[in-house]
Amino acid sequence: MSHCNKNIRKDQRPSLPKGPPMNELDSFFTRANQLLDRWEALNRPASTGVDWAQDAFRWRHDQGGMRLVPVRRPHRVDLDDLLCMQRQKDEVVRNTAQFVRGRPANNVLLWGARGTGKSTLIKAVFNAFIPRGLRLIEVEKEHLVDLVEIVDRLEGRRERFLLYCDDLSFDADDSGYKSLKAVLEGSIAAPAENVLIYASSNRRHLLPETKQENQDAHVVDGELHPGEAIEEKVSLSERFGLWLSFYPFNQDQYLEIVGHWLTRLDAGSLDDEAMRQAALNWARQRGSRSGRVARQFAVDQAGRRG
């Protein structure tokens, strides 16, 4: 047998399967390890080292993990700068005062016309109660799926927290919708005593309603009963214990707010008829007599005057 093997020509010998060169294998494994490192970073628990001396935070969920990021320069707003909304101010201040005292308080939904001070009122109330241990955490809509995680991190701390959701609205298939319902009142776990949700929205029911859904309503014993689709959409906003509505300002209210900001910014006075007409034209061009538009006009005048 040994003699026969020696006589086999080289081209007749079985050949081993060829593989990639070693340098290609090394490159492959290097790229694979890099992908694994990135995947582990995305799924690594965030550091719990939070600087609780700060009073405002943003919730972040990105390649660095899930974490609270301090806001170094929060928007400071005074309650006295909010005009033509006294009823809404009184209600939110009362509810927040109950909360920081450890008394029962409601989650709050501020809804209504754009630019009428909904978000600004939340910021102003927060600033007023910072000395009494109130903290604010801004949660963007795409991160509402993390609400249970956020509340778990805050529960048991001595501070009181407002979870602030600005311009809140949902499409029918948004994943944050059910997470918000669960944290408000729909979970088997009791709500955290030191956490409230304050949200602003242009929609009262937070979800779009179709004509057909409203046509499905029916009357029973003289009472109007919405259809099932509407019931589902209303069920989210009803979990907010305190609803406050905001409506567009009339001309007199708009001018009152303009006059306030002109004085605050040392930018002139509405006693000047030319200034008054300029303020009205400014609102007419934007199609809105809102508090936001009033302040923007005063800022423009302040900038012109240097």
Image (tube, rainbow, N blue to C red):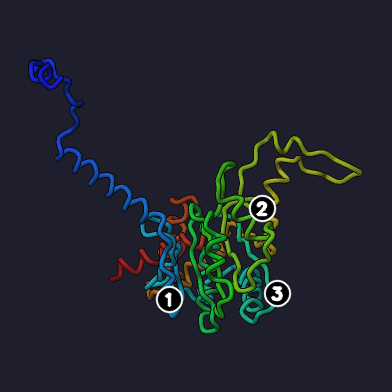
Q: In this rendering, is residue 16 above or below 246?
A: above
> Along the polypeptide, which appears first: circle 1 or circle 2?
2
Q: Residue at x 28, y 45 (%)?
A: 32
The answer to whether residue 87 of the structure is visible from this angle is yes
- Front-lying residue, 34 or 175: 34
> Along the polypeptide, which appears first: circle 1 or circle 3?
3
Q: Residue at x 54, y 71 (%)?
A: 154
Q: Nearer the viewer, mark 1 or mark 3?
A: 3
- Front-lying residue, 145 or 55: 145
- Front-lying residue, 301 or 57: 57
Inspect the image, locate mark 1, and give the three-letter code of the amino acid beneath it: Arg
Q: Is residue 38 left or right of residue 276?
A: left
Q: CA distance from mark 1 to mark 2?
A: 39 Å
Which residue does the numbered mark 1 point to in the structure image?
264
Give the x, y percent position of residue 56: 45, 72
Residue 236 — which label?
A: 2
Give the x, y percent position of residue 160: 57, 76
Q: Secondary structure at mark 2?
A: helix
Give the x, y percent position of residue 288: 50, 53
Inspect the image, locate mark 2, and give the three-letter code of the amino acid beneath it: Leu
Q: Quadrant of the N terminus?
A: top left
Q: CA distance from mark 3 to mark 2?
A: 20 Å
User: Label 3 neighbourhood size at 10 Å, few (<14), some (14-19), many (20+)?
Assistant: few
The answer to whether residue 262 of the structure is visible from this angle is no
Q: CA distance from mark 1 to mark 3?
A: 37 Å
Q: Quadrant of residue 113?
A: bottom right
Which residue does the numbered mark 3 point to in the structure image?
104
